[in-house]
Image (cartoon, rainbow, N blue to C red):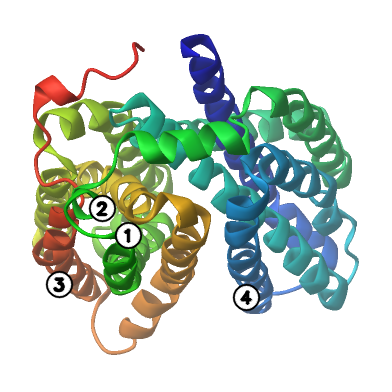
Amino acid sequence: MERSLRGARVATYVYFVLCGTLMGAWVVHIPAVEERVDISHATLGGLLVPLGLGAFVGMQVAGPLTDRLGARVVVPAGGVLCGATLVLPGLSRDPWTLAGSLLVFGFCNGCLDVSMNAHAVHVEKAYGRPVMSGFHATFSVGGVLAALVAAGATSAGLHPAATLAAVGAVGIVIALASARALMPAASAAASNGSTDTVEETHASPAAARRGTAGRVWLLAVLALMVMLCEGAANDWSALHLEDVLGAPAGTAAFAYGTFAAAMTTGRLLADRFVARFGSLAILRHGAATAAVGITLVALGPWMWAAFVGWALFGLGLSGCVPQLFSAAGHADPAAAGANVSRVAGLGYVGMLAGPAVIGWLTHLVTLNHAFVLLTLLCATTAVGARVLRTESGRTPRSEMAGVGP
């Protein structure tokens, strides 16, 4: 049993890397696809809406399907579909075909994203200790792999469609090869009953389910705010250093690098801190740290302050989303997929809306002052972290022994 559980954990890492690589492969080829289709930045921004819409719908479909059929069926299916449709944007020749391609690819990516997160919840529950943040860290590793592959392919003069097709084909093979190591539905159901949440322990199942839906939607709202902040950092961090502080383009690029490196590092370390202090503390203090960081970015007149601020912002946000996803899945393990799909879906809306919201605010105030909105969202998240109290509060260290690493 211990060996199969460790195998399921490794397979989950593989699917998170796979998802990050497939999405990253599309992201790093955006400029080439934009040039091929001959569209403006503004048109491209509009065409990204179908990508988000498809992902949101895919999440809502895959969540309940994962609960019904099991992750061993839905996760590899999502990986195969995502790999198969990755090439479509590279083959597009006009805005309409690109929009359709992104809609389909987004749907498949959303299916993979939610189903693998639902499976991660079951793995974490079976382990009896936090492991969710580590999974999310490997998603970022996938993005790095995609960037390296794209750089090599570009240097070799390969066509974007050829690169996307090759990455997608490898992804299909990996998705199929890793499927058998996932937890079957029966094992996931057994883990659901092994470690009840606080709410399930002290209340009847019917009473617990009645209180779950509202709490899950509160988690979803917090995810929207946190991921809106993350989306804003992705698109505006480099521009902030260049436009507000006058940094050279090469130096300004390190702003996003600082944010991303801090976030990845934080997620690699977060599980240990969750085991020691509890998910509530990680969400509360993480959001507060992010608020301090982005305030330093918004108000600091020095370049070093901006780099410190972006690092604190990434470090603070790093552990927030994994705790929200984990709490949603554990709120009702029998409906982990459906609950994670709600939180992930609304969070994804925030991720897409973040750049647009900050862009709109720049019509009213300067870019750095627009970041004050992110301070308010992080502060609100820190206050709203109390929603996790019914899930974990603080877990004694003696209860976190679980299965070995």
Q: Secondary structure at mark 1?
A: helix
What amino acid is at disc 1?
A: Pro
**Closer to us: 178 or 401:** 401
- Looking at the figure, which quarter contains the C terminus? top left
Answer few, some or many: residues within 10 Å of disc 2's Cα (few below 14, many 20 plus, some between 14 and 19): some
Q: What residue lies at 57% left-to-right and 58% top-to-bottom?
A: 63
Q: What residue lies at 16% left-to-right and 25% top-to-bottom?
A: 399
What amino acid is at disc 3?
A: Leu
Q: Secondary structure at mark 4?
A: helix
Q: Is residue 374 above or below residue 43?
A: above
Disc 1 designates what residue?
Answer: 205
Residue 147 shows in the view? no
| Gap between marks 1 and 2 measured at Cα | 6 Å
Q: Earlier in the sequence, mark 3 or mark 4?
A: 4
| Gap between marks 2 and 3 measured at Cα | 33 Å
Q: Secondary structure at mark 2?
A: helix
- Image location of residue 191, percent across then percent down: 43, 34
Q: Are marks 1 and 2 in contact (CB under 8 Å)?
A: yes
| Gap between marks 3 and 4 measured at Cα | 26 Å
Q: Secondary structure at mark 3?
A: helix
**Closer to us: 182 or 167:** 182
Disc 2 designates what residue?
Answer: 200
Q: Is residue 10 above or below residue 113?
A: above
What amino acid is at disc 4?
A: Val
Q: Earlier in the sequence, mark 1 or mark 2?
A: 2
Disc 3 designates what residue?
Answer: 376
Q: What residue lies at 12% left-to-right and 55% top-to-bottom?
A: 389
- Image location of residue 29, percent across then percent down: 70, 49
Mark 2 or mark 3, whichever is nearer to me: 2
Instruction: Indicate which disc residue 49 carries.
Output: 4
Q: Quadrant of residue 206?
A: bottom left
Question: Would residue 133 be found to the left or right of residue 400 on screen?
Answer: right
